[in-house]
Image (spheres, rainbow, N blue to C red):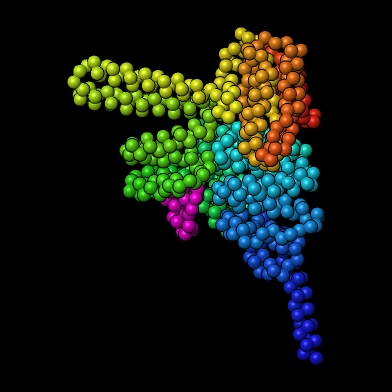
């Protein structure tokens, strides 16, 4: 009897001690997570997950995934997420914790380019934010959506989502969320070549990280500031920019070594090697190469691509062609995976591969990789209006025509020596020219039409409008479908596409013959109306709004679905079409903020 009682007492004391130990350990690891993620992870692993309560299991999972993310151990984060699904939770007080965990889970997939799973977790987080009625959390999720769209190369959609996030977070008192907003805006400015603004935003992020004393975030901010200065120096060289970039890389490296974040050490070392190779400091570059190799890291995915390209550039600078070829081969293997979706920044690296092959006289390989880069660039940027993208498209088209003309000339020369009569040569040449002309005509037609709706696409309607703006005194109506993202997420993209087509039919039938209608974004439309007064504008816009609102859309199971749209209207004034469309767009946002499903004139 005494033995049984002793065992019971021992078991109870062990369970109680385990509970106290686990609770204290989780609290301590939470406190040091951002400053010492490696230590936090070690403490978390000392706790037995199965012995925890449901709330503590959620806390454990959050801390485990967060610390691995901060250390760049995304594979470990994903393994945990997929092995240990979230416990069933009925306690509404834990919804905020579920939101935080969903964001951290999404980061692990985003960092490894699994954008489908990343978006799944972001949508889960958004649902929790809606449930809580928290604009800060909704704005934060829109910020993450913007980051994914940016990684996928859709800068127009990324900027649009970032603006929505900015609107939701403009009055936020959450310094961490505002800092993340600045970080994303800094990245978008960086990707669009506005390095001055990119640096200003990243320095705000750095200031907040220093205030929070978060070593990992300070190191990341130094790295981002260094990247912007280095990239800026490549387009507008100055020794000051090079020096500032070098200082920030070195500060980021020192902190990464302190917190044992090897992926951050790798990133800063790659930055320093690239910078020193560019500026001609080859002895410094050589020292950093040895430091990088001493890390003994295993590379995969984009990190492997960056590693090989930076070292290929370094070996080109020191004249070691053999090593340069080996690393170029390693870089090209990144793109060899079948059916793999590559982030936009990785596709841009194809141009670097082309330049490095050209530097060693491999011109055929250089053209091959330049063409791959060109194809992806056209697919990514054809809907964007930035002048630099138009210039790039023009450059690619000129290159394509030059190659076709070269091939055509070679064919004519070969046939000249093989064909016996001049008449046959002339007929063949005329036939080839006629085919080329038909191809150009077809290409021109396709480049002006939005394939889904049959309306003018963004490029065509803006080019037409700019040429006719003053002559025909064009006015503008811009509208988009309310809650279209929710419709897509709820009913699927097939129904979303069908709604877009039916809305296009409604607008085409409700406008005049002389009006031009175009689809300029996902669910956004623009109407340009010649020679029309304010009263007519209001009547046309209200007629379209009413017809959309009363139209019955059908789901797959034959259920009736109602859709509304919000309108911004700008009457013709002297100036430029782009200014007028901006006024109409501002009016559209006012319509959204006023409750949607209404028409608002620009002021």
Residue 508 painted magenta? no
The residue nearer to you, when weighing 558 against 202, is 558
The residue nearer to you, when weighing 398 against 287, is 398
Q: Decide if residue 591 is in sight here.
A: no
Question: For residue 395, what is the image quadrant?
Answer: top left
Residue 146 rendering spot, x and y as whole percentages? 63, 39
Residue 226 rendering spot, x and y as whole percentages? 56, 43
Which residue is at the far left? 420
Question: For residue 556, what is the image quadrant?
Answer: top right
Which residue is at the far front? 558
Q: What stretch of residues is rendered in magenta?
A: 279-308
Please determine whether, in this image, residue 540 is positioned above or below residue 152. Answer: above
Residue 329 rendering spot, x and y as whole percentages? 38, 47
Please determine whether, in this image, residue 257 is positioned above or below residue 537. Answer: below
**Going 65% across and 28% down the picture, which residue do you hit?**
502
Residue 109 rendering spot, x and y as whole percentages? 59, 51
**Going 71% across and 45% down the picture, which residue do you hit?**
126
Does residue 321 appear to the left or right of 92 in the view shown?
left
Does residue 189 appear to the left or right of 62 in the view shown?
left
| Quadrant in which the N terminus appears | bottom right
**Going 43% across and 47% down the picture, which residue do you hit?**
336
**Going 67% across and 17% down the picture, which residue do you hit?**
511
Does residue 166 appear to the left or right of 329 in the view shown?
right
Residue 303 painted magenta? yes
The residue nearer to you, when weighing 428 against 589, is 428
């Amino acid at each position: 009897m005494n033995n049984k009682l002793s065992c019971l007492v021992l078991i109870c004391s062990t369970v109680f001690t385990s509970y106290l130990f686990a609770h204290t350990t989780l609290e301590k690891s939470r406190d040091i997570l951002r400053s010492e993620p490696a230590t936090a992870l070690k403490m978390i692993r000392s706790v037995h997950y199965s012995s925890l309560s449901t709330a503590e299991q959620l806390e454990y999972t959050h801390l485990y995934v967060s610390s691995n993310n901060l250390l760049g151990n995304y594979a470990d984060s994903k393994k945990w997420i997929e092995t240990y699904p979230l416990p069933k939770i009925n306690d509404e007080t834990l919804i905020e914790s579920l939101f935080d965990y969903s964001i951290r889970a999404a980061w692990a997939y985003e960092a490894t380019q699994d954008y489908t799973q990343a978006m799944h977790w972001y949508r889960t987080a958004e649902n929790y934010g809606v449930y809580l009625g928290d604009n800060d959390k909704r704005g934060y999720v829109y910020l993450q959506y913007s980051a994914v769209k940016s990684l996928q190369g859709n800068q127009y959609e990324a900027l649009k989502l970032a603006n929505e996030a900015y609107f939701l977070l403009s009055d936020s008192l959450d310094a961490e969320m505002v800092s993340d907003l600045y970080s994303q805006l800094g990245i978008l400015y960086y990707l669009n070549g506005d390095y001055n603004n990119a640096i200003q935003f990243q320095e705000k992020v750095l200031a907040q990280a220093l205030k929070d004393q978060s070593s990992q975030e300070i190191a990341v901010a130094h790295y981002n500031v260094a990247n912007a200065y280095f990239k800026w120096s490549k387009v507008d060289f100055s020794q000051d920019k090079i020096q500032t970039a070098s200082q920030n890389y070195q500060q980021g490296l020192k902190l990464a070594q302190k917190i044992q974040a090897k992926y951050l050490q790798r990133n800063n070392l790659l930055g320093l090697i690239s910078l020193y190779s560019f500026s001609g400091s080859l002895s410094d570059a050589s020292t950093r190469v040895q430091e990088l190799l001493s890390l003994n890291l295993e590379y995969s995915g984009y990190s492997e691509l960056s590693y090989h390209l930076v070292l290929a550039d370094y070996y080109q600078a020191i004249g070691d062609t053999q090593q340069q070829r080996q690393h170029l081969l390693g870089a090209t293997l990144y793109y060899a995976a079948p059916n793999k979706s590559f982030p936009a920044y990785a596709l841009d690296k194809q141009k670097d591969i082309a330049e490095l092959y050209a530097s060693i006289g491999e011109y055929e390989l250089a053209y091959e990789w330049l063409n791959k880069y060109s194809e992806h660039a056209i697919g990514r940027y054809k809907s964007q209006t930035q002048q630099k993208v138009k210039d790039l498209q023009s450059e690619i088209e000129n290159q394509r025509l030059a190659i076709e003309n070269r091939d055509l000339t070679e064919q004519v020369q070969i046939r000249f020596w093989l064909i016996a009569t001049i008449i046959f040569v002339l007929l063949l040449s005329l036939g080839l020219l006629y085919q080329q002309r038909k191809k150009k005509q077809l290409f021109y037609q396709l480049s002006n039409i939005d394939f889904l709706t049959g309306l003018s696409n963004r490029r065509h309607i803006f080019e037409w409008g700019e040429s006719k703006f003053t002559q025909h005194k064009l006015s503008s109506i811009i509208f988009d479908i309310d809650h279209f993202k929710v419709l897509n997420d709820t009913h699927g993209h097939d129904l979303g596409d069908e709604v877009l087509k039916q809305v296009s039919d409604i607008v085409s039938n409700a406008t005049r013959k002389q009006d031009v209608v175009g689809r300029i974004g996902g669910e956004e439309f623009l109407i340009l109306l010649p020679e029309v007064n304010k009263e007519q504008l209001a009547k046309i816009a209200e007629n379209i709004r009413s017809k959309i609102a009363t139209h019955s859309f059908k789901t797959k199971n034959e259920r009736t679905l109602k859709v509304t749209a919000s309108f911004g209207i700008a009457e013709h004034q002297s100036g430029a079409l782009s200014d007028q469309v901006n006024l109409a767009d501002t009016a559209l946002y006012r319509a959204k903020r006023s409750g949607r499903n209404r028409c608002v004139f620009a002021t």
